[in-house]
Image: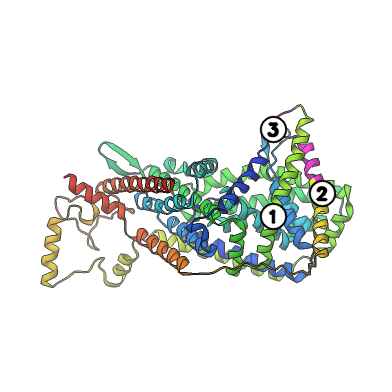
Amino acid sequence: MNNIGKNSFDIGYMDTLAAGDSFFHRLDPRAKLITTILFIVTVVSFDKYTISAMTPFFIYPVVLISFGGLSYKYILKKLLIVSPFAILVGIFNPIMDRGILIQLGSIGISGGWISFISIILRFVLTVTAAFILISLTGFNAVCEALIKFWVPRQFVIQLLFFYRYIFVLTDETERMVRASSFRVFNSKAIGFRVFVLLIGNLLLRTLDRAERIYRAMCCRGFDGHIYIIRSMKIGYQEIIFTFGWALLFIFLRYSNIPLKLGVLVMGVLK
Amino acid sequence: MHMADALISPAVGGVMWATTAGLIAYSAKKVKEKEDDRKVPLMGVLGAFIFAAQMINFSIPATGSSGHLGGGMILAIFLGPYAAFLVMASVLTVQALFFADGGLLALGCNIFNLGFFPCFIVYPLIYRKIIGGHLTQKRIMFGSLIAAIIALQLGAFGVVLETVFSRISELPFRTFVLLMQPIHLAIGIVEGLVTAAVVSFVWKARPEILNAAERSIPIGKVDMKRVLLALVAAAVIVGGALSWFASSNPDGLEWAMFKTSGKEELESHENVHTSLAGIQEKTSFLPDYGFKKGEPVETGPESDVKTPWPAIDSGTSVSGLIGGTLTLLMVVLIGLGLKRRKDIS
């Protein structure tokens, strides 16, 4: 059957995670948003043949996941689900780029495989960073941080409303789909005609629902302005958090620690 | 499928984000101008509708495969271009944050590919022109079909350009285009048929909704659109040129030095420097990050040997591999240690 229920469960689960309590949970969402973006931009700025220089960056997700009480298994599972696209496009690299770049004894590794592994590493790091942001912050807090960053209010208000009604709509859709699949002999995907009727009815119901919501808001004094109240403070913790990680990222980006480590080890072995 | 962060360079991501941010600001301004309070809950709820509808897989007739709705066109038809763009952007944002369907840096690209083309290009220039003020079954079908096909072709082409300009993936332009465009032609046809069917359904059930939508949605001035298009084109070209330039000059400092002084490294004439350099040469196990060679390798403008970029030779790579593996192991150990500490505490 369809995975509508599973999807809305996922969103609800991550929101529940965000309600947890840890040092990272309590930080102002703006600090976490900035750090996540810095992390992603730094990781993505490596050139395409970089592998070992990227490995120290795993310290960021590891620290946040451990101290934030998140589950490695859950994140790994979600990584696997979304990996097909990156793998599908990345797999062309070994096919196209066959020049031998590294010679390990008698085995030659082509540049294509190196860049493929680099793509996989990038993928794991960036996707995990995004999940961690949402799991530690929660969608509402991220939206409020966006308003403070001068993202247009119309857009953020839209985001908040939209998020609120995802649960309502997915519930309704799930009921409709389940009802229709009980009345049909084909257990696979829904037929085209039935789908159009389902969606069409859902759309009509949605438009009516929007009207009801608007009237309910008017009854409660809606005048076109939406007020968002949350006290957010930037304190020492946020500054240390953001600057600390930023300095670390820049340091790791420009000094290839794994290489130096390998040199040391090889020197000791000799 | 949406673009992932793994295939994007910061230059491309940044340029597309700048463009998308500008478009969001512009759309938000336009939506606010209309002063239609009804729009606020309507946009949110329609966004949730599209989100939920995208999760239903339907089987495509005459083929064995299944597909799902995109939604950009439906949104544009019921909300108008500006509101529809904001709604599409929010759907993609939630997908990126919760389902990793597209990366955060690539979100700018995805909002552009899946939002700008349907809402600002195809909807006014194609769908509205075909409808021409009279809603008939044939025009709805024709308009939706052509509009969806073109919107998806443009979106797919956007993905190709962004991937190729980022130069992380090795997919050559021609191969990628030949892969993407036909697939998205089929997807576009399906999307067009679904859009046409849904819009017809609503039109037959409650024609006043669509008539009201048609009347209340003004098309923006053409000048503004041309300006936007010009800006976008400029951004894409500049961004592409920048990333090309950046990647062909590996070490900015050495390149800058070479250009200014004709040498890639400074030569020192003082005694202390030369003696220290001599000691360093004798003791360094991996000079210049490579294994020591028999005789000194010449660098500089006189040498004919052109080191191919990236110049990775075996020494660097072996130490790199060892270092990388060790680092990963350390990180894993740290993670386990932290976890145990947390379980105990």
Q: Is residue B28 above or below residue A188?
A: below
Badge 2: chain ID: A
Which residue is the site of mark 1? A164
The residue furthest front is B345
Q: Are marks 1 and 3 in contact (CB under 8 Å)?
A: no
Q: In this view, does B270 lie to the left or right of B86?
A: left
Prevalent SS, magenta region: helix
Badge 3: chain ID: B
Q: Which amino acid does label 3 sit on?
A: Thr
Q: What residue type is labelled 1?
A: Arg
Which residue is the site of mark 3? B63
Mark 3 nearby-residue class (10 Å; few <14, some 14–19, many ≥20)? few
**Picture quarter containing residue A187?**
top right
Badge 1: chain ID: A
Q: Where is residue B116 in the image (x, y as percent from the top left)?
A: 66, 59
Q: Is residue B166 visible?
A: yes
